[in-house]
Amino acid sequence: MNSFFEETNMWFATAAAISFASVGLHVIGGTPEIMVPLEQSNAPQLSKGIADVIWQQVTYLLVVGGIIFAWASRAKSKALEISITMIVLYAGITLIFIGNGISRFAGIADMPQWVLFLAMTVLPVVGLLRSNITK
């Protein structure tokens, strides 16, 4: 068991765990809060359909992000190449949530999802730096 922890970049593993846990939060917690009211609204069917596709894309993104970070946690020599796209995507999503929160609600508390995306951005970066992979 010790070799597992010695051979695993726990920064990446933690980012993977948060990404996978976010799938559950997104689907179980978010669907009733966001998608059910939208489906019950008078919004046009096309808007509902596009929102549903985007909702499913986020689910897919979180699953793939978890897989990539889990893979990078074990593939130390390839971690940067494997994970850089997810780091950039999650950083961008963090900024989108913060920007939308500020512009729509004058603060970032109403849409706290940015915290998870920030964690999934920072943890792998720390993992890269701590393991000297970027050198």
Image (spheres, grey):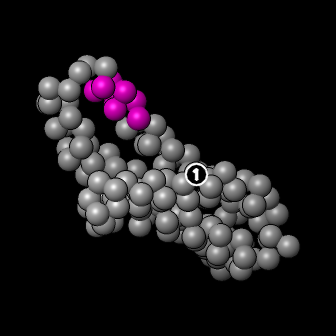
Q: Quadrant of residue 69?
A: bottom right
Q: Which residue is at a point 49% across and 66% down the rendered structure image?
A: 118
Range of residues picked out in magenta: 47-54
Residue at the right extreme of this rendering: 135
69 and 106: which is toward the camera: 106
The answer, for residue 109, to whether it is visible in the render is yes
Rendered location of residue 97, percent (x, y)? 41, 56
The residue labelled by disc 1 is: 89
2 and 81: which is toward the camera: 81
- Report the quarter where the C terminus lies: bottom right
The answer, for residue 3, to whether it is visible in the render is no
Q: Quadrant of residue 80?
A: bottom right
For the stretch drawn in magenta, the main secondary structure is helix
- Report the quarter where the N terminus lies: bottom right
Q: Which residue is at a point 68% across and 56% down the rendered structure image?
A: 83
56 and 5: which is toward the camera: 56
Quick check: 101 left or right of 36?
right
Q: Which residue is at a point 71% across and 71% down the rendered structure image?
A: 128
Q: Which residue is at a point 80% across and 70% down the rendered structure image?
A: 134
Tell me if residue 19 comes above or below residue 40 in the rendering. below
Q: Secondary structure at mark 1?
A: helix
Tell me if residue 120 comes above or below residue 63 in the rendering. below
Rendered location of residue 34, percent (x, y)? 24, 43
- Say whether residue 30 is magenta: no
- Say what amino acid the circle numbered 1 marks: Leu
Rendered location of residue 130, percent (x, y)? 71, 80
